[in-house]
Image: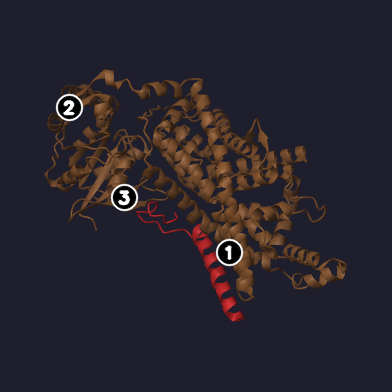
Chain colours: A brown, B red
Amino acid sequence: MSDIRVALIGNPNTGKTSLFNRLTGLNQKVGNYPGITVDKKTGISKIDQNTSAEIIDLPGTYSLNASSMDEDVAVKVLSDKNNDNYPDLVVVVVDIENLKRNLFIFTQIKDLGLPTILAINMADQMTLKGIDIDIPKLESLLETKIALVSSKQNKGLSYLKKLIASYKTVSTKPCFIEQETVLSKFAKDEKKKHHLETVRRYQFLKKTLEKTYTQDPQNAKDIRTFLDRILIHRIYGYLIFFGILFMVFQALFSWSEIPMDFIDSTFATLSELTRTHLPQGIFTNLLAEGIIPGIGGVVIFIPQIAFLFLFTSFLEESGYMSRVVFLMDRIMKRFGLSGKSIVPLISGTACAIPAIMAARNIESWKERLITILVTPFTTCSARLPVYAIIISLIIPAEATFLSFNVQGLVLMALYLLGFFTAIIAAAILDKVLKIASKSYFVVEMPNYKLPLFKNVAYNVIEKTKAFVFEAGKIILAISILLWVLASYGPGNEMQNATEHIQNNHPNYSDEKQQTEIASYKLEHSYIGVMGKFIEPVIKPLGYDWKIGVAVITSFAAREVFIGTLATIYSVGNEQESTIKERMRNEVFSDTKKPVYSFATGVSILLFYAFAMQCMSTIAIVKRETNGWKWPLIQMFVMSGLAYITALIAYQTLS
Amino acid sequence: MMWIQNILTIIVVAGALWFLYTKFIRKSKNNKNCGNDGCGC
């Protein structure tokens, strides 16, 4: 139980999260699917020997005008004394270089009559940028206490904690409220009053900072200006962005190959050891053919997912991602999307669920709806396992194009395909949807900084953990059920399998007979019956009934696809082999041709690029759009598109 | 020993079924913190 509840608030990119990490360390709790806040984090900070504080990291927001979900959350928490999260003290985090803009929200919070202190972050930049602040004067003008901190260099935190501990002495007087009466005289209607208030607040801040803040412009000519000129350039900006993307996907494949192969073979050995060392029986079979391959199907993708988030966290932390948002806004506008849509589209590469929720801060309903509908096209991390294994099956690892790894190129092409499909779909929806709306785009350009290892590590560990423990649990549970469905079947066909094969193929060798028996049993199991039932629909796409079963089960979540195949191919297979080897050796029962040919591989890749194979996304779209209409339209359109493109691809290539 | 293996299998399969049921079918009770505690809603 903590003694003080502190709300941490500030504009995006003020280093609020870094400060939160510094204050709370590992004592954090992160909401998975936020309902009240877009992304709510809480943590406990030891303030002194006897006091601890609960720190609430409120969403990064520019004002308390409640024009977006983020702002609405902040208003609710700070203005409602009965709110569970109502704080004893508010710490407003501002960036030393953007004081005027960042202080706007500070003046609004002061108006609420809450004890509020100011944490001026990135204080380490003061000398470098030639900044000088008269702190006592600023404290008196803003009716507050100020701590100069540097979350990057871990400086000023003890003073900040001291201020937090003495929160009862912090002034609750507003620093701006006297303007209210002036505003009322000038403006009658609410909108004009609101506009005037914003202007007056900025005028107040301008005057305040003129008296307290100086910056030597000579020192301000730094590397940031130089880098910005190149990185958001109309031509070089895009070239550099695609160059970075290209390098990321090349590295993703080549770096994760060795750990993935190691994990794959370890689980194959583990399965074999279980089978040979444990007493024979049904549970041993479940372990060797269901549980171990199921867990293996999750763990194998840890290296690729961890590398992907390592790169994206590094780009985010360095300040480059905000430049990408700015760069992409030029493209976005032409397709009926807001510049803010790029945030869901980029975060959609991790998971569509938080990405769709991130669309809440888009004020215009039309742009928000379009963003929600097209975000599932971006390549989420759940598609990565499917892409990774199919690409490695249909494209040789040693294949190069202009000395670049072709596997990496194909993976990058699939990511771009998802992104551009989302953009094209947005343009179509912009024309089709007749909803009038207007919106504005503001993006904060943070300073470039060397990413803090701790923040990058937190991000990578958190996202990888989410994949392993959230998706992993589903994959494992489905693997167990699949094992049951693949091990038992209707009628006596499965029991008579040995007799049937021995009678029909008496000349087969023992090994061949065993393979045929396993195949016969699987075909007559419950799962085989289900697969056979849908086979006519999926056969034109180049899939056999086993892939059909994987397509059905992966409707729960895309990553279940590989886990399903791993389980199906393990049942009755007593040879020690990896998932990849089993898939590579798989042949059609009638033609004896390899199942995973180039044409089938491309067909699967395209199917998963477009299909809405994710129950959780459907649920979240239903919640965000407040009805079943949009998620159902989205599901049918995406599945239809997936089927048609996969069909065309297979029929053309085969 | 076979009966132990049978019981273990039943427990594991029932656990998997229950997990999938709670994850995808059963509606979670709405509470005011729903959405912040990984309650699955």
Q: Amino acid at mark 2?
A: Gln
Q: Amino acid at mark 1?
A: Ile
As drawn, the label of residue A291 is 1
Q: Is residue A593 left or right of residue A569?
A: right
Residue A438 location in percent, x, y?
Answer: 42, 27
Q: Is residue A511 left or right of residue A358?
A: right
Q: Amino acid at mark 3?
A: Gly
Marks 3/2: CA–CA distance: 41 Å
Q: Is residue A649 left or right of residue A301?
A: right
How packed mark 3 is, by other alpha carbons closer than 10 Å (few <14, some 14-19, many 20 or more), is: some
Residue A553 location in percent, x, y?
Answer: 62, 55
How packed mark 1 is, by other alpha carbons closer than 10 Å (few <14, some 14-19, many 20 or more), is: many
Residue A173 or A192: which is nearer the viewer? A173
Q: Answer yes or no: do the residues labelled 2 and 1 have beta carbons within 8 Å?
A: no
Kindly state the secondary structure of the residue where label 2 is placed.
helix
Marked residue nearer the N-terminal end (2 or 1) = 2
Q: Which residue is mark 3?
A: A25
Foreground mark, 1 or 3? 3
As drawn, the label of residue A179 is 2
Q: Quadrant of residue A132?
A: top left
The N terminus of chain A lies in quadrant: bottom left
Marked residue nearer the N-terminal end (1 or 3) = 3
A654 w.r.t. B12: above or below: above
Q: Report the residue at 30% width, 27% height from top.
A: A191
Residue A591 location in percent, x, y?
Answer: 82, 52
